[in-house]
Image (cartoon, rainbow, N blue to C red):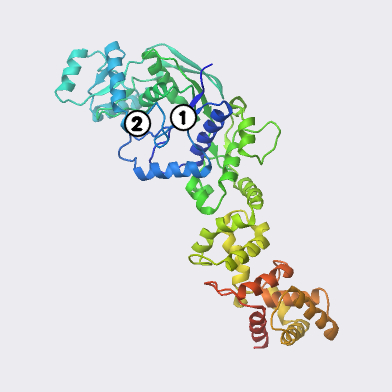
Amino acid sequence: MKKIRVRFAPSPTGFIHVGNARTALFNWLFSRKENGVFILRIEDTDVERSTVESEISLTQDLKWLGIDWDEGPDGGGTHGPYRQSERLEKYKYFADTLLDKGSAYYCFCAPQELEREREEALIEKRMPKYSGKCRELELSGSIERVRRGEKGALRLKVPAGEEIIFNDLVRGEIRFQTDFIEDFVLIRSNGLPSYNYACVIDDRLMEITHVIRGEDHIPNTPKQIMVYRALGWEIPLFAHLSMVMGKDNTRLSKRHGATSLDQFREQGYLPEALFNYLALLGWAPPEGREVLTKEEMVSMFQLEKVGKASAIFDYDKLNWMNRQYIRSVPSENLVRMAIPFLKRDGIIHGDITELHFLWLIKAINSIISNISILSEIPKELDIFFSFPISEMDKESKKILMDETSKRVILQFEEELLKYERINWEIFIEITESIKGKLGVKGKSLFHPLRVAITARSSGLELQKFVPIVEEGANLNFPRKIKSIRERISEILEFITN
């Protein structure tokens, strides 16, 4: 049996959209399941838009997501080069072969002439396709015109009255009539190959067995099949994946949220979570489970089980999945992951000490249940770094202004004078003393104290909050953490003025 070989062939003209990332991932899963070969090929013949920076970015994004390749621009392999810009001689060789066979011809029509033909066809309500006026030009004469420097594009002679039929591994049988397909360009007048030509040459020479790509490529498939046939080559199997849509059933775009891998990385999604979620866009494991390891996904993946319907990208579902992965990360590793976001928000600067690191472990663990993405950590840690008295809501202010609350807070300040430091045990001792002296307990005791030391009427349990704040107040953070004493003092000034 022939070894399975698949490829992901992005153009280095921008960032990788989640739809393309899902395509790469399905190719990767299929190749790994079948013990095949996964190839990364860079389709960079769009010289005006392709950049080295984009190529570097897309390879970094793929590696971040967890997709590696067996052959590619930076990974060796015997079927290279793996950039189309380095394969121009190969395209020329097979273009000459098609010319010699009479399957292709030079077209010398100017762009303005082609546009005029198109406009006339639209006015007359005909299909706007090339008329084929250069099709019967004598080959020797055409070659001489090109030799003298005249610009000419190379077109394939599309056979009339035929039907192109192929069995899509996802969608079943698909048919196209050749009468609706024009003699399409193989080599542009600038010498660069068209997409539908170059990818056929590359796929054949790289021995690709399965072409797995988005459904927007379905109209390209009959053209590519005709190139295969014209060269007498075996045609690979095709599988066209559904589009990735937003919840409103429109094509996923910026208005829905993050759409490219770099944006998800910047927001603090874990690559393992995004990998897992993308794998479930159009495919469901047989056991119905959702949180899976890579090894489980590989073992369960079946290309024939990929659905035809559009895949809906649900950010809420992705956030849920990301939370599951975040909670499974060891505390030390989670802090390391959070450091770039903490630096970005000014919570830490440069290197941190071991004491700061240990404090961050406790602080982040205390708020982890509120976190869906890593970029939310600084905001959630704000409960320790900020003491927003002036921004308190009406409920908090109402609690503070109650006469019983004022007595509790004043007594708390008095009790604090007995202690050099505060921890949870001492906090409880103080509240027990207040109970005995004022006869206040339960909500009437703890609710005023919560507002007094957090400037909020709800939030983290005081048992977690108090020791973390006190420990943090003794550390030199760029943003100072106020101690319990400082907070009580400021609150008393607020309620007595």
Mark 1 or mark 2, which has the lower sequence index?
1
Residue 146 is situated, as x and y percent measured from the top left of the image, at: 18, 22
Mark 2 element type = helix
Q: Residue visible at 28% across and 23% down?
A: 92
User: What is the residue that sits farthest to the left in this orientation?
Assistant: 148
Q: Residue visible at 58% across and 67% down?
A: 356
Q: Label 1: which residue?
A: 7
Mark 1 element type = strand
In this view, 281 is above or below 138: below
In this view, 186 is above or below 464: above
Residue 144 visible here: yes
Quick one: quadrant of the C terminus? bottom right
Q: Residue visible at 44% across and 21% down?
A: 207
Residue 248 is situated, as x and y percent measured from the top left of the image, at: 58, 42
Q: Label 2: which residue?
A: 84
Q: CA distance from mark 1 to mark 2?
A: 13 Å
Image check: 49 left or right of 107? right
